[in-house]
Image (tube, rainbow, N blue to C red):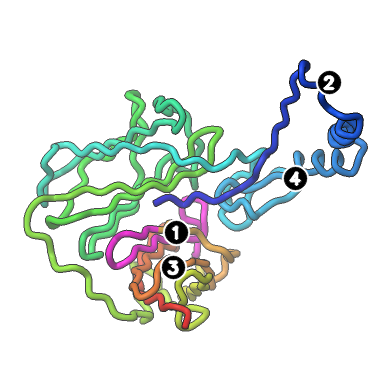
């Protein structure tokens, strides 16, 4: 799965010299008008070239450079078309066991010639965000593999508690591309725990130094339609950005097929924060992990939401 979102489309026209004689006078006039910088079309194209957009939230656009007010990413000009890169995941040792320290190695390759990618842009103060979710949705990890001289990202001493299937989400931003969200699977042999049996859980949670209240709009989320996820944080003092954003969220379906990484849609440093999410499939529960920082302490809280079908 990837969080690929269309940002911008380009049209290129190539007219060979030998074919020029086949064009009618009207066609040549039309082409001249498109290329005339003083024509309405030319002015529109020039204006569009000056637009700065967020690579993570491309609907955020403005005519001046700066940062995205939604996710705090640096705005860029000329967003390329979104293309999914290749992410290879290697686990060491090759037969992992519960309780055994593991090394995860991530190798990124371009989608055209499968060449290794070695240049990346920071995404919220890190080159690579990694999320790991366990087979019964009890294990959750958000951390950051380190880019090494061998051209790969490595994460050492990962200890997974049980056998079963773990889902790993990589979030990274290749230079001159668009941000990538790619999942891979790690399986630990042996008897896996029973699958998660979730029920609706909107109850307020006490984290390390923060109480997190949760509600949704609409009260009953509908799959395929935007749901607002509202959080109220108490105490409201000492609320800080965590890794360049006012919060981080991971959403995972009860069968571990869907994994979504999000940042706040509305946040201004106050005690109320809003995320927007589109739950992909009806009749599934989704576990929502949300992370906020207060006075230097990262707080993680989780909630369970069911997405219904639109009747």
Q: Which residue is mark 1?
A: 248
Residue 138, given in percent of the width and then of the height, sits at 23, 65
Q: Residue furthest left?
A: 190
Which of marks 1 and 3 precedes in the sequence?
A: 1
In the visual, does 20 lie left or right of 166?
right
- At label 1, counting other C-alpha atoms closer than 10 Å, the crowd grade (few under 14, some 14-19, many 20 or more) is many
Q: Which residues are magenta?
A: 239-259
Q: Quadrant of residue 213?
A: bottom left
Query: Please, is residue 106 above or below residue 66 in the view?
Result: above
Q: Which residue is mark 3?
A: 279
Foreground label between 2 and 3 = 2
Residue 113, given in percent of the width and then of the height, sits at 43, 25
Foreground label between 3 and 1 = 3
Foreground label between 2 and 1 = 2
Q: Which residue is mark 2?
A: 21
Which of marks 2 and 4 precedes in the sequence?
A: 2
Q: Which residue is mark 4?
A: 64
Mark pair 4, 2: CA separation? 43 Å
Q: How many marks?
A: 4
Is disc 4 placed on a helix, strand or loop? Answer: loop
Residue 218, given in percent of the width and then of the height, sits at 51, 81
Which of marks 4 and 3 precedes in the sequence?
A: 4
Which of marks 1 and 2 precedes in the sequence?
A: 2
């Amino acid at each position: 799965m990837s969080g690929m979102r269309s940002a911008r489309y380009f049209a290129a026209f190539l007219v060979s010299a030998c074919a020029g004689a086949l064009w009618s006078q009207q066609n040549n006039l039309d082409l001249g008008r498109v290329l005339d910088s003083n024509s309405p079309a030319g002015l529109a194209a020039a204006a569009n070239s000056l637009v700065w957009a967020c690579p993570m939230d491309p609907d955020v656009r403005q005519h001046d450079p700066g940062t995205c007010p939604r996710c705090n990413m640096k705005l860029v000009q000329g967003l390329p078309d979104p293309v999914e890169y290749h992410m290879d995941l290697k686990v060491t040792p090759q037969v992992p066991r519960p309780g055994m320290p593991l090394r995860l190695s991530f190798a990124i390759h371009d989608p055209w010639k499968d060449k290794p990618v070695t240049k990346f842009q920071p995404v919220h103060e890190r080159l690579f965000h990694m999320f790991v979710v366990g087979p019964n949705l009890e294990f959750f990890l958000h951390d950051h593999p380190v880019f090494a001289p061998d051209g790969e990202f490595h994460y050492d001493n990962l200890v997974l508690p049980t056998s079963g299937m773990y889902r790993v989400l990589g979030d990274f931003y290749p230079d001159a591309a668009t941000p990538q969200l790619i999942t891979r699977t790690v399986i630990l042999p042996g008897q896996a725990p029973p699958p998660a049996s979730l029920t609706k859980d909107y109850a307020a949670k006490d984290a390390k130094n923060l109480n997190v209240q949760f509600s949704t709009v609409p009260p009953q989320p509908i799959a395929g339609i935007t749901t607002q996820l509202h959080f109220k944080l108490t105490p409201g003092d000492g609320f800080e950005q965590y890794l360049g954003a006012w919060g981080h969220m991971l959403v995972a379906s009860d069968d571990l097929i869907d994994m979504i990484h999000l940042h706040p849609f509305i946040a201004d440093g106050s005690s109320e924060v809003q995320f927007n999410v589109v739950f992909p499939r009806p009749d599934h529960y989704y576990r929502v992990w949300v992370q906020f920082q207060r006075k230097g302490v990262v707080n993680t809280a989780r909630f369970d939401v069911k997405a219904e079908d639109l009747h």
